[in-house]
Image (spheres, rainbow, N blue to C red):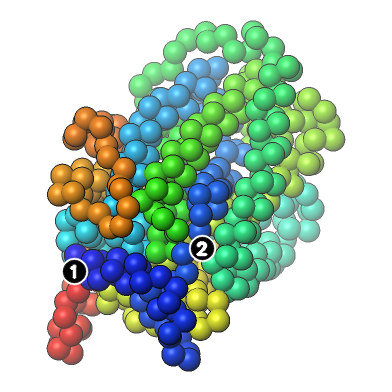
Amino acid sequence: MTKAIGMAIGEARMGTNAVDAGTAGATNGDAALLRRIGFWALAASVINNTIGGGIFALPGTLAKSMGSAAPLAFVLGAIVFIPIALCFSAAGSRVHATGGPYSYVSAAFGEFPGFVIAAVLWISNVAADGGIAAALADQAQHVSAVFANPLARNALIVAVFTVLCVLNARGVRIGARAVMAFATMKLVPLILLATLGFAYIHPINLHVVAMPGSTAVGSSMVAVIFAYAGMETALMPSGEVSDPSRVVPRATMTAIALVVLIYIGLQVVAQGVLGNALAGNTAPLAATAGAIAPFLYSAFLIVAIVSQFGYLQNDLLGSSRLLYALGRDGYLPSPLARITTNSRVPLIAVVTHAVVACALAVVGDFGHLIVLSGGAVCMAYVACCAAAWRLQRRDQHGEGKPFHLPGGALIPVIGCAGLVLVLSTLQKEEWLAIGYALLALVVIYAIVRWMRESKGLPAA
């Protein structure tokens, strides 16, 4: 696998000339991809994929478990998450092949760990997409009662994924522009609420009567880490990022810093405006905006739906490239790695991810799907922190000067330690669900490897 990743990096260096020289029909390999994603597009992608549908419900959930101390959950989450973001920046500046964390772990540790992390990440992402799509349909019920009908709800979900496939099929440039447009439509009202809302805060609502217990803090941290997650998917189309050694670290850290400020500001404003009414509120930001001006309640419901659609668009752009990478390296059927002639996108991978996520949204619900997604992403983050350190220690990198983690192993160790603490708060049922999924992945890996060897093909 490491050799395959290295070859993919080499192909990516060939640039667009290799694309122009392609034959008619679909093309394979990272050299066929166009490096059209720049700093602003990647930063918008990280922000859009991080600030998804969860923030529109999370303040009420945190207030229910932590009371008026809920803003501290985002602060603690940032302390845990910033070292992780630094590790992703370092790894992304050294490995430029499409696949994101899959490529980082494969390049650092080899075939089997890379496959497991890729499969775990894809399951995490497709489960999250199903959950967010289900939440979008639930939000739509507050706008129109017609979507309370199961048939209308499911039709809406199918329509959403159909539109997403059409957007992505037109090319990475169209997809990236759509990401930037959705990020703008979402961020403007959220930033306005997080800043102008301070004028409507009642200081007494921010008074911390009692600090929450360790159990409440632990469960809240799982939710907060999920809320901060998303950069791993935004970085998956690395084979389509221009000058990744420079762009990946700058865009990732800029986006994460902005996300932290927005999250803390929104939680403080919601707590300060609603007080005790925030705890358990299923539409806390809409309720906060409505308390400031009644007409804003409906407006923020629309913002929530747009935000969730933007999240799905961005995740489909990134997660489909993970399926593409697995097909490219021979672990999934090769058609997943086929690039369309005109738009240069892995269309089969795009449609496959969308179909699975759509099915999960139709049959599942937000709460159950997010349990699997949150636990799996934490496990993947541990592996990526370790990969960043190993890649830096070996001084492995492509073209350009890579981002260097200061302090040697200190930042990866801090990131891993924080994630282990978060994982320790998972319940038995959650561990069993993740364990069964991992067992199934190992079986699939063994079957695919056996099939390739029986045909006389290399294992990786």
In the rendered image, is residue 120 in sight?
no
The extreme right residue here reads 295
Neighbourhood count class around disc 1 (C-alpha, 10 Å): few under 14, some 14–19, many 20 upward: few
Q: Which mark is residue 3?
A: 1
The answer to which of marks 2 and 1 sits earlier in the sequence is 1
Which residue: 42% across, 29% down?
78
Compared with residue 50, is residue 336 higher up or lower down, i.e. above or below? Answer: below
Neighbourhood count class around disc 2 (C-alpha, 10 Å): few under 14, some 14–19, many 20 upward: some
Using the rendered view, name the quadrant where residue 299 is placed: top right
Is label 2 in a helix, a strand or a loop?
loop
The quadrant of the image that shows the N terminus is bottom left
Residue 296 left/right relative to 256 = right
Q: Position of residue 322 (x, y in %)?
A: 38, 65
Which residue: 61% across, 28% down?
266
Q: Amino acid at mark 1?
A: Lys
Q: Position of residue 72 (x, y in %)?
A: 47, 21
Which residue: 78% across, 53% down?
145
Distance Cα–Cα, label 2 vs label 1:
26 Å
Using the rendered view, name the quadrant where residue 5 is placed: bottom left
Return the residue at label 2: 36
Which residue: 47% across, 27% down?
74
